[in-house]
Image (spheres, coloured by chain):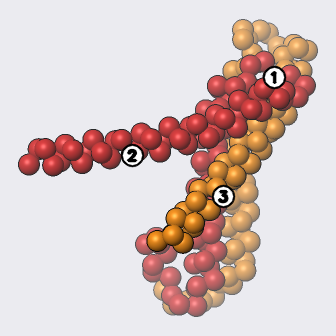
Amino acid sequence: MSDFENLTGNDKELQEFLMIEKQKAQVNAQIHEFNEICWEKCIGKPSTKLDHATETCLSNCVDRFIDTSLLITQRFAQMLQKQSSGGM
Amino acid sequence: MADENYNNGEVITQVRQQIALANAQEMLSKMTEKCFRKCISRPGKALDGSEQRCITQCMDRFLDTWNLVSRTYGNRLEREQNAMQSENALN
């Protein structure tokens, strides 16, 4: 990671720790994003517990959001590729 | 720059504490925003009993939701990793 390049050799422990924490923070930020989106999609009036249908909605929501993101990323890359090869 | 006066353990503990604090703050602000939106439809002179009950339930459901979303994402990451590994094994 370029952010930590200027650390000296015996800071390896620190370097590793920061890299792991950085990855954890990225995963955490991703969970927050999914939570935000799927909360809006699946939760109506808050009740005494999450019912089964809501739980299914939430886990489907996360997986379909990831699928959507992958699909759009792939197709968008194709579009860019086509554009750059067609534009020359 | 080569000053090695600090101790890695101390730095690590401090960074951990700062991360935990930042996470808690993030959770708190998201929870407040979402539960305000769900429970306070028309702000009155005070929070009434049913609004307070709604907020309490909302906080609990928010945490349930967060945990479920986190588990689902974790499972997905694991599945994708396994798929990538078996793909690599084939090549």
* Label 2: how many Cα within 10 Å (few below 14, some 14–19, many 20+): few
Q: Circle 3 — which element?
A: helix
Q: Is residue A76 left or right of residue A54?
A: left
Callout 2, which amino acid?
Answer: Gln
Q: Quadrant of residue B28?
A: top right
Chain hosting mark 3: B
**Which amino acid is tagged 3?**
Glu
Q: Is residue B86 visible?
A: yes
Horizontal and vertical percent for residue B88?
A: 51, 69
Give the alpha-carbon distance from disc 3 to disc 1, as whole Å: 30 Å
Instruction: Supply the letter of whichever chain is red.
Output: A
The label number, if any, that marks residue A74 in the structure image: 2
Q: Disc 1 marks which amino acid?
A: Pro
Image coordinates of residue B61 in percent, x first then y, are 82, 32
Name the residue located 27 percent from the left edge and 41 percent from the top edge.
Answer: A79
**Which residue is outermost to the left?**
A88
User: Which residue is denoted by mark 1 in the rendering?
Assistant: A46
Q: Image point 54% across, 72% down: which residue?
A: B89
Q: Which residue is mark 3?
A: B78
Out of A71 and B83, give the one closest to the viewer: B83
Q: Colour of chain B?
A: orange
- Earlier residue among tags 2 and 1: 1
Residue B34 at least partly seen:
no
Q: CA distance from mark 2 to mark 1?
A: 37 Å
Mark seen at residue B85: none
Give me the residue at 77% from left, 44% from top.
Answer: B67
Q: Which of labels 2 and 1 is toward the front?
A: 2
Q: Secondary structure at mark 2?
A: helix
- Tell me, yes or no, whether dots 3 and 1 are on the same chain: no
- Picture layout, residue A69 above or below residue B47: below
